[in-house]
Amino acid sequence: MGEMGDAHNDRLCRFRSALGFALALFSLLLCLPAFAATADIGGLTVSLPDPASGWGKAGKGDLFMLQKDFPETADDKRGSALIQISKPISAARSLLPAGVKTFVASLPEMAKEDILIKHYGVTVNGHDIRVEERCCVQQQEVSIKQIVVGIAGDKQQAYLQLVLLNLSGDRGKSAEADFEALVRSVKLEPSDKDFDLVPESGDGGLDGVFTYLDTGVRPNVFGGVDFYSDSEINVFDAKGLFSSELPEGGRDIAESCKDNPTDCGLYRLTGGGFFSSAGSIEMRSVTSAYGTIEIETKTFSKKGQDLVIDDEDYRAVPPFEDGATLDGKWVYTFASSGMTATSSGSAAASRELTLHNDGTFERTGWSGASMTNEIAGSRTGVTTSGNRRGSSGRYELSGYRLNLIDTSGTTETMSIFEPDKNSDGLLVINGKNYLKDDGD
């Protein structure tokens, strides 16, 4: 490698050893050439990140390790991401929480930190999976974040860990995305299949888009609470897939779920007989990008074309016909405010969309925010506001899709549906409620 290579490795080793990790392997890391796309780790099969993304095999020992270095920039310190993968070990499913705790303790300082994010569930192959995240320990000006994943079958289990060193923002998110994809690819048993939402025999039985009104209050960033009223949806396909979002761009639900698995899941109607309809629905939802699946069984019944799920009334939402038009102005408004002992703030926004019978549209909007802060008797504040650049052109309605084609030829595609029967008084566009302005 020459003197330059030796100097690089020397700096890298000193960078690692400064962290004071309990495991000596961290101080022995050496970046090696690119590796194969798939690895067999003592019988555990994983799909590795694309070598072009900067990951390389690192170190030696009982743990399979990957490393990616990030150079220093004007805004960020030099950082690294480390992935460790254990060989499968023989253990019962019930020992998974204890195994995760042991793996967390490989970084002793991390074991003292509170768990920020936890995901529990099963994988597509029926294995138990547990994800725990801890952040952030500071050692000699190095910020350390840890994510540990444990996967357990009936006879064996495996553990994976991502450690981020001085990584945050987009750099940290990119490393986490690679780790999430790797975890989804894990095959603990030879019979395991790739991660995919594939309906099983007995799944399915519904078809269409259904909506219900969810209302309540929730805390906001200013220390107050906001009232909300959201038209939530479930999209069901007859084979057994469901989604909590309308597929974008006119795609079918199967295509959309491949790109957005955390919006999706599988369902099965159960409890029916020869003379009665199903009395419950089992929903197997993907709850994280790690592929964790949560299984819930809810009460179910049909009410004409509509559904009742878990005592919520879901109304069937028909699609717009190709070439349909609307006439009127619809307005979306947002407002939030609150205060604490030392600060107060508020934010507001409005969007107006006018659609005409001749297929043309206009769009305008504005937003504003203010905040004050008082520390040691000194008060500071900031206020900002601005208008959204207006646009106009023609629009196209089809199914649950609204295309806005402005005068420059740029097309913006949004989801759209009417939650109220036989009324265009409310349009839900990209998940936001637009109320019709009758001009009164």
Image (cartoon, rainbow, N blue to C red):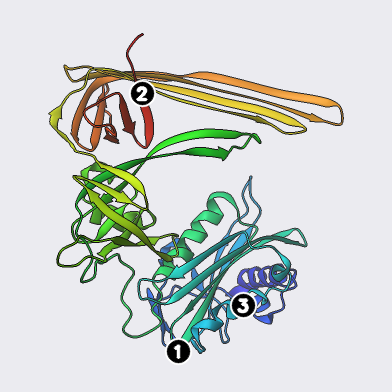
Dot 1 amino acid type = Lys
Residue marked by disc 3: 103
Q: Which residue is mark 1?
A: 155
Quadrant containing the N terminus in the rendered view: bottom right
The residue identified by callout 2 is: 435
Q: Amino acid at mark 3?
A: Phe
- Residue 44 screen position, x and y as percent: 42, 83
Task: Give the quadrant of residue 122.
Answer: bottom left
* Distance from the alpha carbon under mark 3 to that under mark 1: 19 Å
Residue 435 at what x, y percent from top left?
36, 23
Residue 183 location in percent, x, y? 45, 70
Q: Nearer the viewer, residue 205 or 38?
A: 205
Q: Is residue 325 above or below residue 438?
A: below
Between 150 and 435, the one lying in front of the other is 435
Residue appearing at x 68%, y 80% in the figure: 23
Q: Secondary structure at mark 1?
A: loop
In the rendered structure, the answer to whether residue 310 lies left or right of residue 393 reads right
At numbered mark 2, what does the secondary structure look like: helix, strand or loop? strand
Among all residues in the image, which is located at the extreme left? Answer: 322
Q: Where's residue 427, x and y in %?
A: 31, 29
Between circles 3 and 2, the one closer to the viewer is: 2
Q: Which mark is residue 276?
A: none
Crowding at label 1, few (<14), some or many (≥20) Cα neighbours within 10 Å?
few
The quadrant of the picture occupied by the C terminus is top left
User: Above or below — where is 300 with respect to 383?
Assistant: below
